[in-house]
Amino acid sequence: MEKADIKISSIYAMKVGKNTIGIRIMSQNPDGHWVGVNVNTNKEVIIKSADRLCGVYHAKANRAVQGAKKDAESSNDATSKKERTGSKHGGLSAAVRVLEEAAEPLNCKNMVNLMLGKGYWKTNGKTPSATIYSAIAREIKAKGDNSRFRKTERGKFMLAK
């Protein structure tokens, strides 16, 4: 959008991540940025550039588009979902696979070496063993007894079941 097109008290669409939200412009500061309010949450938003706004916000049209996306996602059958998730393996699923094959507790450095060596996981990260350790620890904390992993001793994990 252009700076001249923005009017106070009008509602404009603004992209925030993947979402498009409605912003009501409340005022313009002397330095050129605008103060707006999110129409859904009433939180204040500062807009420093007119390029952040996508145009006039249409609430009903936006909801219809979001509803259509949800309907399309839910209409996919289970096999197509399995095919999508099967093509890209995450670090935790690769760790499960390596631990199943090892049948003994492993530390994260050994797990990562096996995962990368066997091609179960690919990463360009500088500290993949720290990434896997953190992910396993988060899963244990979040899921508790339902976690796929169990800590056996300092730095070593095995499969829970």
Image (cartoon, rainbow, N blue to C red):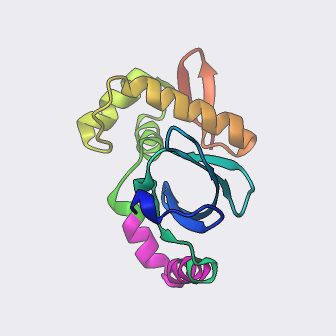
Q: Is residue 120 left or right of residue 44?
A: left
Query: Which residue: 61% across, 68% down?
Result: 11
- Measured as percent of width and height from the top left, residue 30 is found at 55, 40
- The residue range painted magenta reads 63-84
Q: Give x and y (percent) for residue 81.
A: 45, 72
The answer to whether residue 44 is magenta is no
Up the image or down, 125 lies above or below 88; here it is: above
Query: In the image, is residue 134 above or below residue 98?
Result: above
Above or below — where is 30 with respect to 69? above
Classify the position of the C terminus by image quarter.
Answer: top right
Q: Name the image quarter holding residue 1.
A: bottom left
Q: Give how far across and how far down residue 10 sits, in percent.
A: 61, 68
Q: Which quadrant would residue 46 be assigned to in this image?
A: top right
- Could you say where residue 49 lies in the image, as x and y percent from the top left? 44, 48
Between 101 and 55, the one nearer to me in the picture:
55
Residue 77 shown in magenta: yes
x 33%, y 61%: residue: 87
- What's the residue at 31%, 28% (across, down)? 113
Q: Main SS type for the magenta part? A: helix
Does residue 157 sit above or below 8 in this rendering?
A: above
Image position of 114 (left or right of 90): left
The residue closer to the viewer here, 16 or 52, is: 52
Q: Would you say 136 lies left or right of 24 here?
A: left
Tally the marks: 0
Please name whichever residue, 118 or 16, is drawn nearer the observer in this view of the structure: 16
Q: Residue at x 67, y 58 (%)?
A: 38
Q: Residue furthest top?
A: 154
